[in-house]
Image: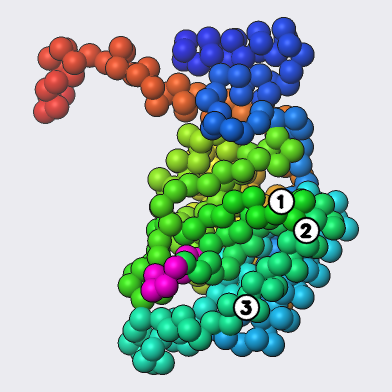
Amino acid sequence: MTANRNFKRRVRARAAKTGESYTAALRHFRTAPQGESMPKNTTMRLSVAQLAVLPDPGDTAALRDGGALIRRLMRDAHAAGARLLHLPEGALTCPDKTIMSVSGADPVGPADWSRADWATLAAELQAITELAAQLRLWTVLGSVHPLTPPRRPHMSLYVISDDGAIATRYDERMLSNTKVSHMYTPGSAPVTFTVDGVRFGCALGMEAAYPEIFLEYERLDVDCVLFSTHGPGTQVNNGPFALQAQALAAANSYWVSYAGTSQDAPNAPSGVISPNGDWITRCRPGPAAITTAELDLAAENHARPWRRVARSDLYARHQAPDDPRSLDRTRP
């Protein structure tokens, strides 16, 4: 444990010298992704939503109603004092594989994206960006993102800044068999962004089943991963993705915001998970709701820096590769 104690001593020495908090001083020893600023605040208020996603991207009236619901939730988050609202996968539309299939039945075939009302989806997204600027509210929501035909679209998270611009976009990478075979083009890169000094990463769909996605974000020095999904919210383990999100938060010692759908809410409501893996708030089951949490970055977290030390060459110099009693695995 000497290496860990020395590491902590260096961080505390910098904190004493500069007057920074332990967490702020810790960042001096981390490699920050290029182009992203160092933190200014130690707390942030975040709202996470659940709503019933719309299965038919060609249903113009439903898309307009869905956009209006998202804007209502944005106003609710603003009233709660949130700086960022996190919405589920497919918040604007989450196309159903059967509806989109050319065959129109099981077994599903390639999706017919000419059925989507792209003009209305674009108009609703524009109205959401305008409200984000009006409320000064960062808004992260799921929808489909069209590519150049004949390529299939991405399933994406749009990151809308508080000045109403699309700051970046995350495209789901680890797609299900149906998604990659018939519906979407997979993404290819992690995405991070910073709000008031708090660094976020994005994940989508079933990516909670892939720990490497979340470990990658730990290496990219995020404070919180925004995970948007559409289930499964089964009765088993209170929803496997929700359970996995808890484990991933604890394993990586960062916050995870879990945005699920109302369809899954009875067993896996949306909420915020602490770096210890505990739910600190969850939505009540219902057709649409938000819950709000304060992310406190000032609390000391010894596990995360130690794991970084442990993943270096720490153990190699303590091993006994030439000791015969170590090499012989059959000897008592």
Q: Which residue is mark 3?
A: 119
Closest to the observer, 113 or 264: 113
Q: Would residue 136 be found to the left or right of residue 184 on screen?
A: right
- Is residue 37 magenta-colored? no
Q: Is residue 241 above or below residue 200?
A: below
Residue type at mark 3?
Ala
Q: Which mark is residue 161?
A: 1
Image quarter (top left, top right, bottom left or bottom right) of the C terminus = top left
- For the residues labelled 3 and 2, the Cα–Cα distance comes to 20 Å
Residue 53 shows in this picture = no
Contact? badges 2 and 1 (CB < 8 Å): yes
Mark 3 Cα-neighbour bin, 10 Å: few <14, some 14–19, many ≥20: few
The amino acid type, in three-letter code, at marker 2 is Ala
What secondary structure do most residues of the magenta stretch adopt?
Answer: loop
Q: On residue 132, which mark appears?
A: 2
Q: Earlier in the sequence, mark 2 or mark 1?
A: 2
Which range is magenta? Answer: 148-155
Please report the residue visible at 44 percent of the width from the left and 68 percent of the height from the top.
148
Inspect this view and state whether residue 118 appears.
Answer: yes
Q: Position of residue 86 (x, y in %)?
A: 68, 57
N-terminal-most mark, 3 or 1: 3
* Residue in the picture at 65% in, 31% down: 37
Q: Secondary structure at mark 2?
A: helix
* Residue 96 rendering spot, x and y as whole percentages: 49, 81
User: How many neighbours does mark 1 have within 10 angstroms: few (below 14), some (14-19), or many (20 or more)?
Assistant: many
The residue depicted at 64 percent of the width and 62 percent of the height is 141
State the CA–CA distance, disc 3 to disc 1.
22 Å
Location of residue 7 in the rendering, given as x and y in whole percent from the top left corner: 54, 14
At label 1, the amino acid type is: Ser
Q: Residue furthest front?
A: 148
Residue 106 vertical placement versus 272 (above, below): below
The residue at the far right in this view is: 79
